[in-house]
Image (cartoon, rainbow, N blue to C red):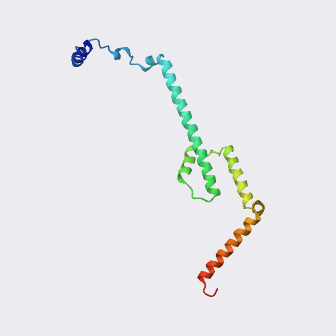
Amino acid sequence: MAFLIKSMVGNPLKGMGFGGGEEKAEAETPKDPAAAAGMTREEYEEYQKQLVEEKMERDADFLHKKAERATLRVCLREKYRLPKSEQDENMIQIAGDDVDVPEELLKMVDEDATEEEEKDSILGQMQNLQNMDMDQIKEKASATLTEMKSKAEEKCSIM
């Protein structure tokens, strides 16, 4: 009951300055951020410099990684004769011309290229034929032949 009366009467009076019992939290917290962190001014400034340097280093590394990826995309576009991307070229120019594709990515691209060359060669095609079932090939050929005959009969009145 006392709580109810105190909350009803006390809350309106707090706005007027009569609330009493209100502690000032602002007076306890220092205005200086160095003191808030528990450091001296010099330590705090050194800490801030380190943070800025680390951020700049992270940003430079990130930019370099993005440029490496752009270089790889440019290489793949050249390989497959796709249109060039201005965004990739701009990224490479921003990072500098000394950007190389990472060795791991080059290995992956080279492996893919050798696999494609093997598949495109005559020997690769023959290996695919060896893996196929001859009965299946005969069935497909006969089905294609009968399909072509039926279409020709429909279109040609002489047959």
Q: Residue 147: x, y in percent?
A: 64, 74
Residue for point 27% across, 14% down: 3
Q: Is residue 133 left or right of residue 66?
A: right
| Quadrant location of the N terminus in the rendered image | top left
Q: Residue 68: x, y in percent?
A: 61, 45
Q: Quadrant of residue 120?
A: bottom right
Tell me: residue 49, above or below residue 22. below
Q: Is residue 38 left or right of residue 147?
A: left
In this orientation, which residue lies closer to the viewer: 2 or 104? 2
Tell me: residue 149, above or below residue 114. below
Residue for point 34% across, 14% down: 27
Residue for point 66% across, 46% down: 105
Q: Residue 132: x, y in percent?
A: 75, 61
Q: Quadrant of residue 13?
A: top left
Q: Residue 142: x, y in percent?
A: 71, 72
| Quadrant location of the C terminus in the rendered image | bottom right
Tell me: residue 55, above or below residue 106. above
In this orientation, which residue lies closer to the viewer: 87 or 125? 125
In this orientation, which residue lies closer to the viewer: 49 or 123? 123
